[in-house]
């Protein structure tokens, strides 16, 4: 089955909001064998919506639409859908009950603004919204499907997970598309490609794409097969040919983040972790604590922005700062050793000198990351986590 | 002038990469009076690219394309553009020199993979890339423009800022579109709309859009006028009618983030700031240190994940934790007072109890943010920053 993802909203077209919905929807559709052929963003304008919907409906099996279902005057998607399917709006008792429950839970009272939200296009299947007041809708006609959901990411995501994906997962498809992404860091795209050599020999008829970003290069393997088993087998073979050549740089696969990998390693070895940061300003600790279960190994973090705090909390000698400056190998090492000693942990990291200290060694490495504040924080937090991974796994630098 | 933003890449269609480029390009085009009417994402497929380019070229004045210019086998955009404009590739000496300089700066050597990158379509204007090896291209024909840039965000952003925007800013347009966004937090969308009352009376012919997110509700005012001055005047009038009704909830406008606003307030009052965090795990400090100049007022942060660290670094009495638990009003207050006392700062914050302490008062407020880890961190960091803003500006809660 082929699909088009239509996201509606002037906020997208003026660049005020980044379109995260389209990517989320595409991932989910892929997981039940529905391919996304196009993503289109149009304005909250009736004729634009109708033209794009018509074109998308005629060239695909599934059209997924988000946005423009809110309670305010600029939301016109529901009425426009009625026009497209030549139907009208009717009150839906189930939707009213859900909205009443939603408001009650949050100690909010019913107001006129919610009356409009209880109306749905006649003949559609209502998709319940348990996290907001706008219901979703599914239209089925001649084996084609149009699905409309709110633009608020969390509400849309719950509807996809709880309703849309279960709805489509029963329907059969004739081929299976599988993707697997290997994530590398510490090497530029062109060198990684050169190390892999002849790509055709690596993929043998399948596809390999390189996706560089601030935190590394992802290599995405894509295979198309008749069934899941042979697709999985083919991916396994390609992956092992890639790993044979560039294993060292690969820290994880698919959705795995470096902070998760580091968390797993630390947990397996029954270690604890503490962080002393300076220029990254909490970004490393923030990433570490994004991982569920991190409270079992993450002991504490110190963001020693001022010299005073480096001296007081991390016990960095004043003389070291005076002699070498705050951004130096010596101070980074002292910060790492300091946070380790005050917290009684095994693996601490300090920073754009990245220091490391465990029971057998203390050292610091120097990194240059350009001059853009947010990029420095991104690069440095990625490099610090990678340093812990390689050190613990005894991978050379 | 009207435009279409075309982003090319299978990684976008399978949802692996979130499309941040389209939003960035739209913001920039808007700033020189070019409206974006559509954003379209298509795959790295020649016929898909040609069909979409043809359609976009015929319905707009400017087509901006990103993606598929890299050095690897899956990058086909440059060749496809040659096909569209019926031209061929020629070696460009200027591009070769830039790539050589780029490699030299990074201690990397020339390899065959870069030969391909020195080729550009005959007849185009070359857009230099100082942050990567793929040049951009600009085609001008019958007052229509097609611009192609790499998909790597930072490379594309620099080309937009240094070349594309200066190129178009001279060209005249017959109307001016101005936007202004007021950012509110601590109130749901429907209540905010209800407090504003009759929207038509507020905007008087212009447009107002409500954009809810995890960190608040943005209200976007859009006006279309003949010249910049009358557009600015109209926005000013609408803004003052909105502020008259919901001033209290508005913390900033347009690109202003709450952490910037808090930074400005703290700076004006010559205060310093320290943070003690627990469940937000560094996200608040991370946001604070995203602001240039924050090192002048941000003294330190402590992420006291373990009880031990709360007791040792923040001097929270063990008895308080035993009696009330780590997630309690009492411990949040003690964390705030603790980080303030050890750092000698004026305004500390601890956390989903959010504690506050300054020279005249210490207190804590209770928040419930559902059960999604990343959402809790987002909500809680937003609420903590908002608490500081309101307390310092003496705005009631």
Image (tube, coloured by chain):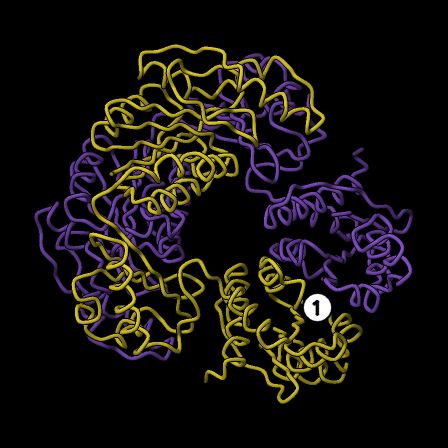
Chain colours: A yellow, B purple
In the displayed structure, does residue A323 sit left or right of residue B61? right
Which secondary structure lies at badge 1?
strand
Q: Quadrant of residue B334?
A: bottom right
Q: Is residue B191 above or below residue B67?
A: above
Instruction: Name the residue located 82 percent from the left edge and 49 percent from the top edge.
Output: B328
In this view of the protein, can residue B98 be seen by the observer?
A: no
Q: Is residue A339 visible?
A: yes
**Which chain does tag 1 point to?**
A
Return the residue at label 1: A299
Quadrant, the C terminus of chain B: top right
At horizontal 38% and vertical 27% (from top left) the residue drawn is A43
**Residue drawn where x is 53% and y is 31% of the image:** B211
Of residues A86 and B109, the one nearer the viewer is A86
| Residue A10 image point, x, y percent | 42, 30
Q: In the rendered image, which quarter contains the N terminus of chain B?
A: top left
Horizontal and vertical percent for residue A382?
51, 67
Q: Where does residue A58 sit, x and y in percent of width and height?
A: 21, 27
Q: In the rendered view, would you say A48 is above or below A36?
A: above
Q: Which residue is more in the foreground, A253 or A52?
A: A253
Determine whether B191 is above or below B382 in the image: above
In the image, residue B319 sits, relative to residue B145, either above or below, namely: below
Q: Residue furthest bottom?
A: A360
User: What percent of the width, then of the height, locates residue A70?
Assistant: 51, 24
Q: Residues within 10 Å of mark 1 (few under 14, many from 20)?
A: many
Would residue B366 be found to the left or right of residue B158 on screen? right
- All told, the count of numbered labels is 1
């Amino acid at each position: 089955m082929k699909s088009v993802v239509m996201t509606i909203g002037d906020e997208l077209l003026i660049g005020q909001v980044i379109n995260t919905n389209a990517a989320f929807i595409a991932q989910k559709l892929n997981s039940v064998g529905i391919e996304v052929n196009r993503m289109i963003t149009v304005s909250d304008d009736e004729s634009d919506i109708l033209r794009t919907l018509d074109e998308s409906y005629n060239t695909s099996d599934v059209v997924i639409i988000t946005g423009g279902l809110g309670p305010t005057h600029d939301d016109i998607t529901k009425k426009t859908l009625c026009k497209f399917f030549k139907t009208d709006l009717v009150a839906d008792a189930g939707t009213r009950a859900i909205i009443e429950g939603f408001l009650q839970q949050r100690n909010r009272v019913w107001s006129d603004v919610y009356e409009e939200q209880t109306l749905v296009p006649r003949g559609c299947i209502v998709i319940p919204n348990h996290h907001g007041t706008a219901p979703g809708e599914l239209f089925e006609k001649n084996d084609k499907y149009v699905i409309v959901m709110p633009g608020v990411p969390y509400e849309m995501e719950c509807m996809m997970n709880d309703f849309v994906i279960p709805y489509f997962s029963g329907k059969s498809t004739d081929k299976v598309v599988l993707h697997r992404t290997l994530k590398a860091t510490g090497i530029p795209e062109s060198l990684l490609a050169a190390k892999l050599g002849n790509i055709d020999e690596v993929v043998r008829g399948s596809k390999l794409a390189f996706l560089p970003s601030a935190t590394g290069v992802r290599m995405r393997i894509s295979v198309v097969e008749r069934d899941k088993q042979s697709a999985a087998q083919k991916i396994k073979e390609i992956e092992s040919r890639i790993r044979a050549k560039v294993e060292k740089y690969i820290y994880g696969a698919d959705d795995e983040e470096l902070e998760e990998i580091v968390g797993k390693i630390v947990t397996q070895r029954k270690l604890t972790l503490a962080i002393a940061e300076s220029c990254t300003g909490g970004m490393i600790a923030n990433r570490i604590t994004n991982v569920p279960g991190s409270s079992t190994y993450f002991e504490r973090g110190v963001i020693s922005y001022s010299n005073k705090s480096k001296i007081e909390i991390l016990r960095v000698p004043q003389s070291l700062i005076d002699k070498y400056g705050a951004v130096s190998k010596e101070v980074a090492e002292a910060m790492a050793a300091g946070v380790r000693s005050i917290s009684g942990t095994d693996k601490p990291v300090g920073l754009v000198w990245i220091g490391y200290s465990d029971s057998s060694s203390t050292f610091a490495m120097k990194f240059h990351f350009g001059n853009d504040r947010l990029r420095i924080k991104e690069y440095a937090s990625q490099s610090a986590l990678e340093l812990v991974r390689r050190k613990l796994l005894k991978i050379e630098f």
